[in-house]
Amino acid sequence: MTVQRSQASQDADIIVVGGGHNGLICAAYLAKAGFDTLVVESRSSVGGCASTVSDLGARFNICHCEHTLVRAMPVIEELDLASHGLEYLEADAGTINVFHDGSQPWVHFHEIERTIDSLAATYPGEVAGYRRYVADALPVAQLAITMARTVPSSPRLLTSAAGIKGAGAKRLLEWSRRSASSVFGDYFDAWQTWMPAVGNGPTVWGLSPDTPGTGLAAAIYASRHLVKTGRPRGGSGALTDSIRSRFEAAGGRVMCDATVESLVVDDGAVSGLRLGDGTALTSRTVVAACDPQRVFVDWVQDPPAAAKKLVERWRARPVDDGYESKIDAVLNELPRPLFMDRLEGHLPGLDVWSPTTVVSPSPDSLAQAHKLRLAGAVSADPTMLINTPTMLDETMKDPEGRHVLSLEVLFTPYSLPGGWPASKEPERWLGLWASMMEPGAEEAVHAWRAMTPDIYERDFSMHRGHTPAFAGSPLAALVGRQPELTRYRTPIGGLYLSGAATYPGAGIFGASGRNAAAVIERDIRGPVNRRLVPARRRLQAMVG
């Protein structure tokens, strides 16, 4: 079914603000459905933090950006992204887990038994706990993925979720209320077993693993047994390039170098937006695939009566600071990791360069790192994520055939005393990396750059260098708590939200873009299904 194209009075049927992967996915589905859709992006190119960019004569991913959950979504097949150039490469191992204190490293694989074999050779006392963990966590991970694949307010998911009586659903609800550390404590004695999962979960979200509500992060190992991690050939940006290609093939349009100044709201509904250069764009449907706090604080000048409380709530929220940085380097040669010998004893021939290496602090050091970050200081032992993208993907090598190093560093506060331009911290992080390699690693660095929170703010419109992330549970989303984030609608008629701050959350996921598009299409083409009310009430009773 097609819809009528925009009339002369409108610049587009739908305007999507923000050309990150969620904004592009939302726009691609809407264009595929027949809507005249325009993407407005403040940068000179789309992709956001999923981009791959050129610098120092090489190609770098803006973020560490391994892709797991997006591969569990139907997006790639439904948009036929393979026909638009998307191809995934996979390392043999999932992650190599090493520790600042020199603890025994171990390897997590997509295959359960290979992971258990690695634990048996390094932390044999954890094997029985890992088997119990897998049995309990796999149903939780599968259910969470199923929920993320479906619009939270859809009749099918609401009615089926309300009647779930299985252990997986009960455990998902239980874990969503608990802290990650308490859930892991049910299965593991050695912190070295669970701390790498924290580094990919609560730590990336800026939260302590002791924080109630982070418990679903405990499903991360299980989710990677269900879905194998991959990297797009050509860099993370190959994903967003393929989505843009699909979007434009369906008639979609992209406007870059366009910064939104404000929304235009008439009679309680959006009628367009105004750009920083004074240009007015008209549309009765606008999707903000960006930080919702900036939308309600900066863009909504005079909120209509129905939206005043919501706008006041967002304006009263604390402003979060960014805390992630990244070193990008070009290497003349690949240095040999010091931990390689300790792994080769039971994993001969293991490729240690292609997978991500997660460098974790101890729980005490992690707690101290959070305190230091809040005080504007950097931990001596930050969580770090290391990989060499060019080992798996030769297309990312520079013209001279050199390798590229990706070193992501956490606990790097936006408000650093003295400011980031004068800081010696990035050099220290590079030194930490070199200390994990055989002698001569620093001499192998041909060129490098640091991406710190101030640069993310300057170049990617991330206020104070912060990336918002949805922090609610799947069941809370199903019953519609914070509807602007879980239903994607706002009290301002025609204004919708998508992106990392909306359900199901941050990372290379894509579900919120797909879900938002489904909600918008349904709103335009027909009324909301009123049969959802009884199911929603049953779910509210479950969540409490």
Image: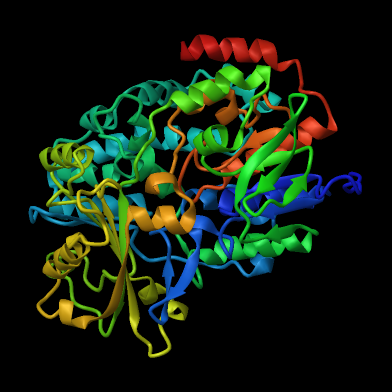
Q: How many labels does the image show?
A: 0
Residue 220, image x, y percentages: 37, 42
Q: In which quarter of the image is residue 267?
A: top right
Extreme residue toward the front, this view: 278
Side (left or right) of 458 relative to 433: right
Residue 99, image x, y percentages: 15, 54
Residue 49 visible in this rendered orientation of the protein: no
Query: What's the colour scheme?
Result: rainbow
Question: Measuring 57% from the left and 17% from the top, which residue is drawn there?
Answer: 309
Residue 49, image x, y percentages: 47, 56
Q: Is residue 266 above or below residue 120?
A: above
Q: Is residue 261 above or below residue 157?
A: below
> Closer to the camera, 138 or 429?
429
> Closer to the camera, 300 or 14?
300
Side (left or right) of 535 relative to 142: right
Question: Measuring 89% from the left and 48% from the top, which residue is drawn there?
Answer: 5
Question: Measuring 14% from the left and 48% from the top, which residue is drawn there?
Answer: 123
Q: In this view, does 220 lie above or below 229?
A: above
Question: Measuring 44% from the left and 27% from the top, which residue is drawn there?
Answer: 168
Which quarter of the image is occupied by the N terminus? top right
> Closer to the camera, 219 or 393?
393
Residue 374 visible in this rendered orientation of the protein: yes
Residue 382, image x, y percentages: 19, 51
